[in-house]
Amino acid sequence: MMNESNTIAVADAPEMFRPLKWNELAKRGDYVKDGNDGYELWVGPSGFHAGTFHKQIYRRLSPRPATDTPAK
């Protein structure tokens, strides 16, 4: 269950998150939309398929490593 006192509003751009596929397992550190064009930390149970929950669950994308480009 979502607990209002334990949620964190995240104002990151939507491209920072990806929706979980229906068969991916939800885990702590995932997010759900907060209803105000932002995301809040998922504080519910872990270990269930994301497709079984009534809200879409999102995961923060991993930062892409900087590529070393040789100077010209």
Image (cartoon, grey):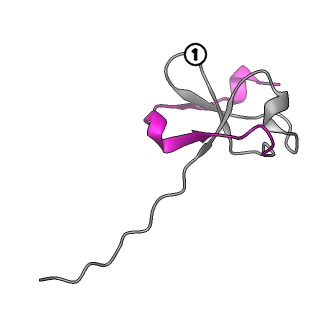
Does residue 23 lie above or below 52 as drawn? below
Residue farthest toward the top in the current orientation of the protein: 35
Residue 27: image location, x then y, percent: 78, 45
Left or right of residue 65: residue 42: right
Give, as a single range, the part of the protein colored magenta: 1-24
Query: What amino acid type should be assigned to the residue bearing mark 1?
Result: Gly
Count of marks, rendered view = 1
The image quarter containing residue 15 is top left
Residue 6: image location, x then y, percent: 71, 30
Left or right of residue 13: residue 32: right
Does residue 69 lie above or below 13 as drawn? below
Q: Secondary structure at mark 1?
A: loop
**Magenta span includes 34:** no
Neighbour tally class for label 1: few under 14, some 14-19, many 20 plus, Cα within 10 Å? few
Residue farthest toward the front in the current orientation of the protein: 22
Front in this rendered view, residue 33 or 51: 51
**Badge 1 is on which residue?**
35
Residue 36: image location, x then y, percent: 51, 16
**Magenta span includes 3:** yes
Does residue 8 lie above or below 20 as drawn? above
The image quarter containing residue 70 is bottom left
The image quarter containing residue 28 is top right
Q: Quadrant of the C terminus?
A: bottom left
Left or right of residue 48: residue 30: left
Residue 67: image location, x then y, percent: 35, 73
Q: Quadrant of the N terminus?
A: top right
